[in-house]
Image (cartoon, rainbow, N blue to C red):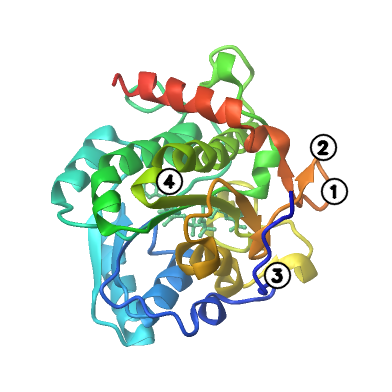
């Protein structure tokens, strides 16, 4: 099958990708939208006229960042809502505050390589819970809002880190394996990529297009547990370039109804059979439809639904 190409590339920026697109009247939620690549993602979408909600853990710093986004985009419709995606009660509370349609959900919040094995109140490994399960529950909770928007999008921010580990179905929470912070990150990001496959399969009929992406290597607070970004400088991206693929998946007319794919550098990624030294491409296990269905079923069970 031919890979999807868009005319944009590795160096494209979020503002270039959204040029000429009018998002007036569209409502967007960006989790973790008040730092790192979340900020230029929000600025680009707000500049195109969208109404943005930054769903964040720290409301005070969220409000400060929202003011900057309003200044940089010239759009006053930037709001802040409290959301901790690792806490089911917080997700439930956030969902109670959301009324009406939702056009674009950007599952962007994430944590990488927590040094010690940590569990949520439900006994879920923290990176799996934050990067994947919390966003899974959030998307389920917003499904009717996304459906009522008509032609909605979900953007699932994965990572080239998925190349470090498939989802280990027999030991999701490191109850048996020795905990490795990067393998745990890898597993969680494989789960995020599989979510796009499973959700698109189930929700395309509701007009919801779901795709996943790797933003690239961008120096942000994400690398605080790993001593900073190790990628050679020439392969790094600016936050504006890092946000480009998220913004593309959220808005590109080419992707209307075209989901279940994994993108990087603004184009669909090629499948790799072995982890390349430059960590490009997508592993077959992260887009496998059977694994995607299995993960969906397991996740529904974990939620007790
Ligand atoms: N920066 C990179 O090189 C890179 C590479 C691949 C993937 N990513 C992914 O991009 C996304 C954004 O990362 P970033 O680089 O901007 O880093 P970042 O640390 O600046 O942003 C992550 C955001 O997620 C939020 N967050 C973490 N745990 C949360 C929780 N429990 N509830 C709500 N919010 C929470 C943080 O507060 C922060 O605002 C992440 O999903 C990350 O895994 C980044």
Regarding mark 3 in the picture, which secondary structure is present there? loop
Give how far across and how far down residue 180 sits, in percent: 64, 29
Asked whether residue 117 is in view, the answer is no
Q: Is residue 86 left or right of residue 77?
A: right
Mark 4 Cα within 10 Å, few/some/many (few <14, many 20+)?
Answer: some
> What residue is disc 4 on?
204
Task: Estimate how packed mark 2 is, as few (under 14), some (14 to 19) or many (20 or more) residues with alpha carbons within 10 Å.
Answer: few
How far is disc 1 from disc 2 in space, using C-alphas?
A: 12 Å
Disc 4 versus disc 3: distance between alpha carbons?
28 Å
Residue found 76% across the figure and 52% down from its top: 280
Return the mark for residue 10: 3
Q: Give residue 273's mark.
A: 2
Location of residue 31 in the rendering, given as x and y in whole percent from the top left corner = 37, 54
| Observer-nearest of 101 and 15 | 101
Mark 4, secondary structure of its residue: helix
Q: Is residue 94 left or right of residue 286?
A: left
Residue 216 sits in quarter? bottom right
The disc, 2 or 4, on the residue closer to the chain's N-terminal end is 4
Earlier residue among tags 4 and 3: 3
> 121 above or below 70?
above
The residue carrying mark 1 is: 277
- CB of mark 2 within 8 Å of CB of mark 4? no
Q: Are marks 1 and 2 in contact (CB under 8 Å)?
A: no
Tell us which disc is closer to us: 4 or 1: 4
Give the x, y percent position of residue 146.
30, 52
Disc 1 to disc 3, how far (Cα)? 18 Å
For the C terminus, the image quarter is top left
In this orientation, which residue lies closer to the viewer: 273 or 241?
273
């Amino acid at each position: 099958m031919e890979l999807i190409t868009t005319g944009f590339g590795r160096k494209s920026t979020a503002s270039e990708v959204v040029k000429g697109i009018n998002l007036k009247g569209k409502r967007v939620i960006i989790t973790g939208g008040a730092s790192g690549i979340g900020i230029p993602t929000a600025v680009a979408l707000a500049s195109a006229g969208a109404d943005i909600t930054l769903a964040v853990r720290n409301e005070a710093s969220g409000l400060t960042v929202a003011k900057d986004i309003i200044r940089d985009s010239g759009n006053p419709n930037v709001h802040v809502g409290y959301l901790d995606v690792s806490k089911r009660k917080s997700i439930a509370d956030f969902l109670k505050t959301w009324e009406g349609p939702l056009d674009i959900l950007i599952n962007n919040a994430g944590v990488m390589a927590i040094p010690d094995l940590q569990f949520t109140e439900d006994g879920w490994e923290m990176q799996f819970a934050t990067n994947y399960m919390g966003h899974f529950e959030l998307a389920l909770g917003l499904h009717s809002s996304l459906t009522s928007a008509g032609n909605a999008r979900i953007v699932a921010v994965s990572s080239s880190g998925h190349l470090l580990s498939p989802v280990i179905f027999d030991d999701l929470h490191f109850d048996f394996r020795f905990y490795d912070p990067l393998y745990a990150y890898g597993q969680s990001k494989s789960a995020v990529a599989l979510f796009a496959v499973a959700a698109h399969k189930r929700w395309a009929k509701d007009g919801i297009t779901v795709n996943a992406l790797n933003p690239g290597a961008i120096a942000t607070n994400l690398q605080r547990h790993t001593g900073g970004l190790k990628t050679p400088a020439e392969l790094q991206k600016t936050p504006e370039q890092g946000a480009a693929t998220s913004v593309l998946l959220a808005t590109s007319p080419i992707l209307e109804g075209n989901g279940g794919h994994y993108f990087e550098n603004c184009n669909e990624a090629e499948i790799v059979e072995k982890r390349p030294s430059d960590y490009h491409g997508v592993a077959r296990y992260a887009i496998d439809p059977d694994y995607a269905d299995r993960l969906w079923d397991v996740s529904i069970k974990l939620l007790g639904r």
